[in-house]
Structures are given as C-alpha cells and as structure tokens.
Amino acid sequence: MIKVNVLSEENSWSKKIRKKEILFNQVCQNFPRKFQFHNKKVYITLLLSNNKNIKILNKKFRKKNNHTDILSFPFNSKQKDTKEVYLGDIIISFNYVNKPRNLSSNEIKKKTIKLFIHGFLHLLGYNHIKLKEYKKMFNEEKQIFASIKKLLN
C-alpha cells in the first residue's frame, strides 16, 4: 500500500485540484499490481510548489540554476526487508503545469498526475538518460496512466 503525504506551498494548486491528498492516494491505489507494494506500507511526500521554489531546490541539490517541471528525491536507504518503506519526495511546479495559462481543472489534474507518475518512477530508480532507459520509463508511464484514467472523469 502506498500512502502519499501532500503538501502545498502554492495557493494556485487549491483553485485547480481539490482534495489533493485523497486524489493522489487514489492514484496510487489504482496503479498496476506490480507497483502496489502488497504487504508493505510505502510512503511518499508530494510537494506542490511553484517555479520560484523549485528553482531554489534545483540549484541547491542538482546544481542547476533554473526551474523545472518536477524534481524527485529518492530516499536511498536499504529498507528492502522492512514492512515500512519511505520512497522519497516529489516536487511539482504549478507554473509549469498551468501552461498554457488557465487550463481547466481537469487538464491540470491530468498533467499533474502524469508528472507524479514520472516522479514516482524516478523514486523507484527509473531514469531517461539513455534512449533504452527512456523507452522503458515511457512505456511504464503509459501503462500506469492507463490504469488510473478512470479517476479523471
């Protein structure tokens, strides 16, 4: 079971996505079986942020002085045999998600969920540096998103 703790430091998120913690926990409950972590309690922190704050984090932790759509910070601890696992943190920028400006709530929700899935896969060790890795990660993203599409209605 995956539990998502959702924090928000950007007020604009609340205007577009209601009941954020419920939504992201439902997203995780609808993941394909291989991402369900049965018999374990898995925790993730999701920070809904903005370009200004994500730029600060990107510079501090990745030495890149620019904003980005999403950051993922895996918690690299050897917790394989425990019943509780903290996967890490995902940070998503509202300014990125809301482009073009004034998207509908449903469009914002869809883009945010896609980014969340992308960040989740990074927490599991997926990356997209090489073409082969990119294809594998992209296919997993598509599979996961297809499993949660019913939540977008």
Image (cartoon, helix red, strand yellow):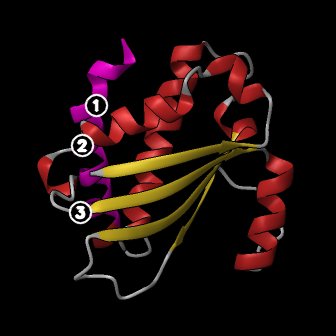
- The magenta region covers 134-153
Residue 130 horizontal/vertical position (percent): 38, 75
Residue 52 horizontal/vertical position (percent): 86, 51
Res 53 quadrant in image? bottom right
- Mark nearest the camera among 3 and 2 is 3
As helix, strand or loop, the secondary structure at mark 3 comes to loop
- Left or right: 105, with 41 as reference point: right
Residue 123 horizontal/vertical position (percent): 43, 67
Residue 50 versus residue 133 in the image, above or below? above
Query: Of 40 and 29, which appears nearest the observer?
Result: 40
Res 72 quadrant in image? bottom right
| Magenta stretch: helix, strand or loop mostly | helix
As helix, strand or loop, the secondary structure at mark 2 comes to loop
How would you rate the neighbour count of disc 2 (Cα within 10 Å): few for under 14, some for 14-19, many for 20 or more?
Answer: some
Residue sitting at the far bottom: 78
Compare marks 3 and 2 and give the one earlier in the sequence: 2
Residue 86 versus residue 151 in the image, above or below? below
Say which residue label 3 marks.
40
Amino acid type, residue under disc 3 in the picture: Lys
Q: How many marks?
A: 3
Question: Looking at the image, which residue is at 16% across and 61% down?
Answer: 39
Amino acid type, residue under disc 1 in the picture: Ile
Say which residue label 1 marks.
148
Say which residue label 2 marks.
31
Question: Looking at the image, which residue is at 47% across and 27% down?
Answer: 110
Residue 152 is covered by the magenta coloring: yes
Query: Of 101 and 93, which appears nearest the observer?
Result: 93
Q: Are marks 2 and 1 in contact (CB under 8 Å)?
A: yes
How would you rate the neighbour count of disc 3 (Cα within 10 Å): few for under 14, some for 14-19, many for 20 or more?
Answer: some
In 3D space, how far apart are the residues under numbered discs 1 and 3 (Cα atoms)? 21 Å
In 3D space, how far apart are the residues under numbered discs 3 and 2 (Cα atoms)? 15 Å
